[in-house]
Amino acid sequence: MPKVDDAHFAARRRQILDAAAACFAREGFHRTSVQDIVRESGVSAGLVYRYFTSKDDMIAAIVTERHEQRERRLREEDPVTAYTDLLRGLGDPATRDALRLSLQVWAETVRSERIRDLVRSGVDRPARLLAGAALPPDLDADSVIRIFIAIYQGLLLQTVLDDTLDHAALAATAEHLLRTALTPPPERGPAGEGMMGS
């Protein structure tokens, strides 16, 4: 397929997914019809169905894209910095629709096994990616990672409910806790002194 066709395909797909995400954030998955997405996107129903066979396909594509973006950041950046940037980003007014959409995705996991599997993989894959982090011997890497994922999820929920949160302070606190967890205790010499003495 020529590159111009690839670019056109990607642009149309993006146009439809952005319209679907806007509709889902505004009205919810079940109150949004494909016709709503057609109106929002400005393309024909036939073209929408050429790219996606159903609303569930659109939801799955949105979830997959978001997970891939987060994983890319964790691979390419310092994981602690990438994580705390995600927490700070929760306070950006431009993310409000995305946060509401995330809550709906989590709720959809109760109804849809496909969406549940995608959301589960969005937790499991980063956990595996970061499982090699150096930790004090008494801490389980998977447990630490899942606790910090839970902090992100909990703060996302609180952000949707309360727009007065101080996300900079929350991110700074989470960064301190995470860096503390990732810092092995100093080696001890005789009589409890550090290896270099005190």
Image (spheres, helix red, strand yellow):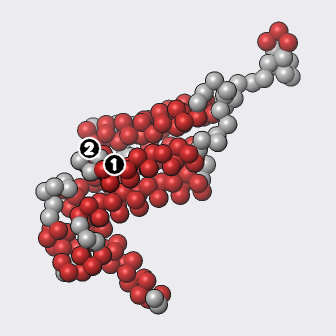
Q: CA distance from mark 1 to mark 2?
A: 7 Å
Quadrant in the picture for the N terminus = bottom left
Relative to 56, 124 lies left or right: right
Give how far across and how far down residue 180 sits, in percent.
Answer: 61, 30
Q: Looking at this view, is 117 or 80 the one in front?
A: 117
Kindly identify the amino acid type of the residue bearing the numbered disc 2: Val
Q: Looking at this view, is 61 or 19 the one in front?
A: 61
Kindly identify the amino acid type of the residue bearing the numbered disc 1: Arg
Q: Which residue is mark 2?
A: 110
Mark 1 in CB contact with mark 2 (< 8 angstroms): yes
Give how far across and how far down residue 193 sits, in percent.
Answer: 81, 14
User: Please, is residue 197 above or below residue 48 in the view?
Assistant: above
Q: Which mark is residue 116?
A: 1
Q: Residue furthest front?
A: 113
Q: Residue visible at 44% across and 50% down?
A: 121
Q: Looking at this view, is 97 or 138 the one in front?
A: 138
Element carrying mark 2? loop
